[in-house]
Image (tube, helix red, strand yellow):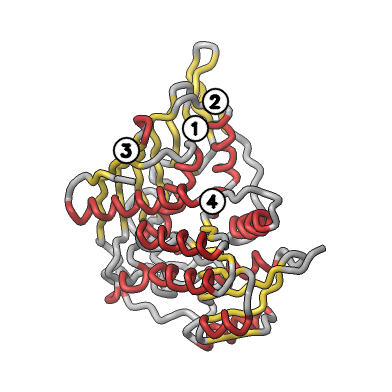
Amino acid sequence: MGAKFKVAVIGNGMIANAAHIPAWKDIPDKVEIVAVADNREIAAKETAGRYGIPGAYADYREMLEKARPDIVSVCTPNCYHKEAAIAALKAGAHVLCEKPISTSEANAAEMYRVAEECGKTLYVSQTMRFDPKVLAAKKFYDEGLIGRAYFVEANLIRRRGIPKWGFFHMKEHNAAGPGYDLGVHIVDSLLWILGSPKAVSACGATYMEFGNQDEGLYESLAESGAPIGVFTPRKYDWREFDVEDFIAGFVRLEGGITLILKTSWAINAPEDGGGTFISGTKGGMRIMPQAELITNMAGYQVNTKIKIPQGPNVAFFGHYDVTKQFVAALEGREEILVKKEQVLNVIRTLDALYASSEQGREVVISG
């Protein structure tokens, strides 16, 4: 067995503690975590102590210089992904960047340009691709059971689930709300299932109806996306909330496919939002909440429930698959799954939805 990859983690909040670090720890024969860094020194020290990691830093640039990692997980708020990832790439590390890759296509393109110049791999943590239902839908579509797709509806709805432990709710740090937090997952996974058709135009609308007030509701961290991993939370203040709590959009894709997106942290609507499904010329497939094939058989309309083997019973199990796939790609055993053009297509689509909301009109997408 060759030498292990040395891993470091920038940003030691919930997603680092609940997902990235446990996932890296799950492959001890391949990697060892040598250091963590967070501008809140207490978070770095507590994270290092919790997982027995030797290095803890308040300055990630110092960490990169002293620890010399081979791989860096970037787990900062969205607005700092670009800066941290580029610093890690220039320091000689491959990068696993938490989604979304950054806050614009221009930023994302620069990150990939630097990775290519440095001869390093930039991998974006689009973990929903590893969801068993998504994998099943990909197989059904690739094998032609649905036919030619022409309409897709993507719903990822939290009735009430505003993240209240960090900076998610602040534009200064995260740039946007559920579109970046949740929408990026569902858009990425559906485009991937369909073979990554490019977005042609988008019409979007964003709303801030509940986040900027105290509704006095009993809520849980699990309902807002943090079943575990919140150890040093920042005190939440609803008065700071200045991103959308709901985004809806209509996207035209290559090949005449249309996609409707609805995703929220807070909305008075059923949590399945009507489900996520693909409509094709031979049949359809509901992906969530229940995997189901919708087709005709022997002259009858038939809905067939699909039994999907479930993933591991751990929080954020998709990150475990991501880290394994990333290492396999670095070792040359597998082709990298989350590719540059796919990531750029997703962030370009989100850019257009937000631009459309600001401008009050449909936006044509170039590129």
Residue extending furthest right? 1
Q: In which quadrant of the rendered view does residue 78 lie?
A: bottom left
Expressed as whole percent of the image width and height from the top left, the position of residue 29 reads 77, 65
Secondary structure under tag 2 reads loop
First in sequence, mark 1 or 2: give its number: 2
**Foreground of the two, 262 or 30:** 30
Do the numbered discs 1 and 2 sit on residues whose CB atoms are within 8 Å? yes
Residue hosting label 1: 285
- Which residue: 39% across, 73% down? 167
Residue hosting label 3: 252
Q: Nearer the viewer, mark 4 or mark 1?
A: 4
Residue extending furthest front? 117
Q: Residues within 10 Å of mark 2 (few under 14, many from 20)?
A: some
Q: Is 5 left or right of 154, judged from the image as shown?
A: right
Residue hosting label 2: 145
Real-space Cα separation, disc 4 to disc 1, in angstroms:
23 Å
First in sequence, mark 3 or 2: give its number: 2
Q: Amino acid at mark 1?
A: Met
First in sequence, mark 1 or 3: give its number: 3
Residue 147, visible in the rendered structure: yes
Q: Residues within 10 Å of mark 3 (few under 14, many from 20)?
A: many
Q: Amino acid at mark 4?
A: Val
Q: Is 360 left or right of 115, judged from the image as shown?
A: left
Q: Is 215 left or right of 189, judged from the image as shown?
A: left
Secondary structure under tag 4 reads loop
Real-space Cα separation, disc 2 to disc 4, in angstroms:
24 Å
Q: Residues within 10 Å of mark 1 (few under 14, many from 20)?
A: many
Secondary structure under tag 1 reads strand
Expressed as whole percent of the image width and height from the top left, the position of residue 273 reads 39, 46
Residue hosting label 4: 338
